[in-house]
Amino acid sequence: MKNDLVEKASEIVADPLVLINLVSKRVAQLNQGRSPLIEALPSMGFADIALTEIIEGKIKLVEGSNS
């Protein structure tokens, strides 16, 4: 996981625990075969993909959502 991506994503999702949960859930989806919502480079891991999706606004936090 790249630190610059974490820093940029933390500007969007300020609470670190929420950011970790959001990335973890998306990584689990990617591990289960879901397609990336961005054009992923071969060098990108699932966490990098999830962080980039957050940064690009492809994934948004919905307050009060459990899923």
Image (cartoon, grey):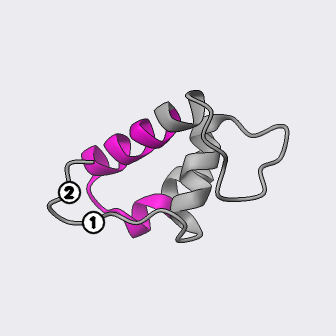
* Most foreground residue, 3 or 58: 58
Residue 65: which disc? 2
The residue type indicated by label 1 comes to Val
- The answer for how far apart the CA atoms under marks 1 and 2 are is 6 Å
Side of 15 relative to 6 (left or right):
left
The spot of residue 27 in percent (x, y) is 51, 36
Instruction: Say if 36 sits above or below 56 in the image.
Output: above
Looking at the rendered structure, which numbered label has been put on residue 32? Answer: none
Circle 1 residue: 62
- SS assignment at label 1: loop
Which secondary structure, mark 2?
A: loop
Q: Nearer the viewer, residue 25 or 2?
A: 25
Q: Residues within 10 Å of mark 2 (few under 14, many from 20)?
A: few
Residue drawn where x is 68% and y is 35% of the image: 45
Q: Residues at badges 1 and 2 in contact (C-beta under 8 Å)?
A: yes
Question: At label 2, which amino acid type do we have?
Answer: Ser
Residue 46 spot, x, y in % from top left: 62, 36
Magenta segment, prevailing SS (helix, strand or loop) = helix
Quadrant location of the N terminus in the rendered image: top right
Q: Is residue 42 above or below residue 14?
A: above
Question: Is residue 43 found left or right of 20 in the rendered image?
Answer: right
Residue located at (35% from left, 62% from top): 13
Give the residues drawn in magenta, as a range.
8-27
Residue 16 position, x and y percent, is 30, 49
Outermost residue, top side: 31
